[in-house]
Amino acid sequence: MLSALMVAAALSPAVQAFVKIDKPVVAITRVRVIDGTGGPPREDQTVVISGGKIAAVGPSASTPVPQGALVLQREGGTVLPGLVGMHDHLFYPAGGAIFHAMPRSFPRLYLAAGVTTIRTTGSIEPYTDLEVKKEIDAGKQPGPRVHVTGPYLEGQGTFTPQMHEIRDPDDARRTVEFWAEQGATSFKAYNFLTRAELGAAIQAAHARGIKVTGHLCSIGFREAAALGIDDLEHGLVVDTEFFSGKKPDECPLPRAAAIELSRMDMGSPQIQQLVAELVKRKVAITSTLPVFELFDPTRMTQPRALEAMSPDARSLYLQNQLRNAQPAKDAADWKKLLQLEMQFERAFAAAGGTLLAGCDPTGNGGVLAGYGDQRGVELLVEAGFTPVEAIRIATMNGAQFLGEAERIGSIAPGKLADLVLVEGDPSKRIADVEKVEIVFKDGVGYDPGKLIDSVRGTVGLR
């Protein structure tokens, strides 16, 4: 592994403009450490970064600072592992069932918020995502590590012309094989896929050691689990298997399914059986609470997100929010559904299920890259997880699912120096995860303020 100084030297001038620290050895002293394992915070620690890796972590009184190291004394501050965003697209809604790629603004916002690794979890422009990954890896633009998910595996009846409609199981198999050759490292099944098509896709992916996740509608969660799916996106609120009018391989009207679901509760035997089945089959769930939060008409996006949007994107979001504030009489009760989803995620994790986290910057446009990931951690705490549990979900759990736990996801000697230095104590006030001072990736410290300023007013454009 190259040293931080060598990594910084390999960065293009366009990326170096955002580098705040490029010293070969850095010691962060007198700092609190939340290590991502779920263990209690450790006070008055020293974290030594050398050669792009974490060289040492321990009490400041007994952990030596190497001679010549740049010392950052941060009493009252906290070091966290870099967040691992497991539903973090590189596109954004443009209205009218169309999406725009965000190959410039989103990588910077993810990194600025302390998200050092992402899984794209469905791609509108897979070639764009693959090229963005190459640019970041080559030091040509700032951004997180990118695990590229292939194009959506969607069936007949998709709502957007930007998705290929799978015709049959052979088409599903060929699609997986083609995009795996191009560099996709996971796949995502979508609303209208049939069970036969999903089964073929899973078989083709697993033959290559690749995992499949899904945002499903035509297929119920337990059906997908029986087919061998590895992960399910969003959680209970998109599972249609409890809808009274559900037909095999057909996606019911989401509104109708959501209305019926909102009348259920976590005490329902059907939901309890679902939790048990998913845990038994080791199917992970990706929490995307930020995107559902904004379906609740009593909640609004954060001012910092509005500042990042282009004028057109801001106007479109506010129009959507205005309509959301005046729901139709037959609309689903999203205030109740959000609470039900939170309860489901708590029950799933308590039963031994693997819960992941991501922001999903889609929906009504109020969720943005990076900001949404931080908000997701806050909402997990609102759901009843402790702050250190929520941080583990957003860091170590994702790293383990990606097979990267030996390199990222927690703070330990020998791991990559993907670290977030924040002001305050997120273990006591989770909103402090937003107070990012420096983001280290491979030991290079990036300035979040400069990254944010560089894309202000551009989300929705590029």
Image (tube, rainbow, N blue to C red):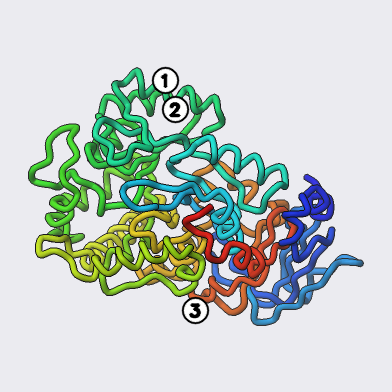
User: In the rendered structure, which amino acid carries the disc numbered 2?
Assistant: Ala
Counting from the top left corner in percent of width and height, residue 67 is at 91, 67
Mark 3 Cα-neighbour bin, 10 Å: few <14, some 14–19, many ≥20: few
**Residue 371 seen in the current view:** yes
User: In the rendered structure, which amino acid carries the disc numbered 1?
Assistant: Arg
Gap between marks 2 and 1, in whole Å? 10 Å
First along the sequence among labels 3 and 2: 2
Counting from the top left corner in percent of width and height, residue 455 is at 58, 62
Q: Kindly give the residue lying farthest to the right in the view shown.
A: 67
Mark 1 Cα-neighbour bin, 10 Å: few <14, some 14–19, many ≥20: some
Of the two numbered discs 2 and 1 in the rendering, the one whose residue sits closer to the viewer: 1
Counting from the top left corner in percent of width and height, residue 358 is at 44, 55
Q: Residue at x 58, y 52 (%)?
A: 104
Q: Kindly give the residue lying farthest to the top in the view shown.
A: 170
First along the sequence among labels 2 and 1: 1
Q: For numbered disc 2, what is the local secondary structure?
A: helix
Q: Could you tell whether 363 is left or right of 373 in the image?
A: left
Of the two numbered discs 1 and 3 in the rendering, the one whose residue sits closer to the viewer: 1
User: Which quarter of the figure is the N terminus placed in?
Assistant: top right
Gap between marks 1 and 3, in whole Å? 48 Å
* Numbered badge on residue 174: 1
Q: Residue at x 35, y 72 (%)?
A: 300
Picture quarter containing residue 138?
top right
Counting from the top left corner in percent of width and height, residue 233 is at 36, 47
Q: Residue at x 52, y 74 (%)?
A: 427
Residue picked out by circle 3 = 429
Q: For numbered disc 1, what is the local secondary structure?
A: helix
Residue picked out by circle 2 = 205
